[in-house]
Image (cartoon, rainbow, N blue to C red):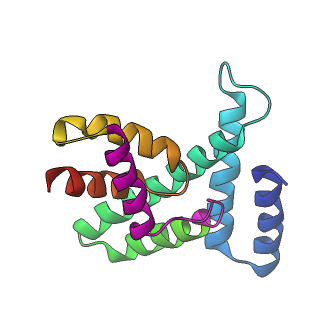
Amino acid sequence: MDLQEKVMTEMKAAMKAKDTVALESLRAIKSAILLAKTDKGAGSELSEEEEVKLVQKLVKQRKDSAAIFKEKGREDLAEPELAQAAIIEKFLPEQLSEEEIEKVVVQTIDSIGASGMQDMGKVMGIVSKELAGQADGKTISNIVKAKLSS
């Protein structure tokens, strides 16, 4: 079952349950899928990798918005954004823990012989490809910085 079919199934359940937050979140995913499919140069179907990137982007947008709202003291606006992010995250592959990410980062640093911050780009490129969809880029970046600076 591809992402669009999963979203449609969840939308039906959300409509029956009258869950407006879930419905709004699912409609955002559906809209993003349709936009991606109609983009210039895009095929009629999205690959699984493209679907994961699309969902990650939606989650990141919600979390960034919530952070901005919290910064401005608007908890009332931040909460729905975080609720939507939680619903959209269900469509991502299982996320790795920081310890698991750290293992991959250490292995990568050892395998390419990275010695300092000047090698961060190389390490980030390899680790990001390896953990695509399983870890947040910001988390990976923080772990790589910590390992390379120590």
Residue found at x 27% / y 56%: 142
Work out which quarter of the rendered image holds the C terminus and state it: bottom left
- Asked if residue 101 lies left or right of residue 93, the reply is left
Q: Residue at x 34, y 38 (%)?
A: 112
Q: Please tell me in which quadrant of the rendered image residue 42 appears.
A: top right
Magenta stretch, main secondary structure, is helix
Nearer to me, 74 or 11: 11
List the single residue furthest toward the top. Answer: 41
Quadrant placement of the N terminus? bottom right
The image shows residue 107, relative to residue 84, as above or below, that is above
Q: Is residue 149 left or right of residue 24?
A: left
Identify the magenta region: 88-112
Image spot of residue 123 (x, y percent)? 34, 41
Q: Examine the structure image and report whether residue 86 is included in the region drawn in magenta.
A: no
In the image, residue 116 lies at what x, y percent?
A: 17, 42
Residue at horizontal 17%, vertical 41%?
117
Residue in the foreground of this view, choosing between 50 and 148: 148
Identity of the residue drawn at 37% across and 61% down? 102
Say which of 76 and 28 sits in front: 28
Out of 138 and 150, give the one closest to the viewer.
150
| Above or below, 147 relative to 115 | below
Residue 132 appears at what percent x and percent y?
53, 48
Image coordinates for residue 134, horizontal then vertical, percent: 54, 57
Give the tally of numbered discs. Answer: 0
On screen, residue 72 versus residue 111, left or right, reads: left
Magenta stretch encompasses residue 107: yes
| Left or right of 131 on screen, residue 92 | right
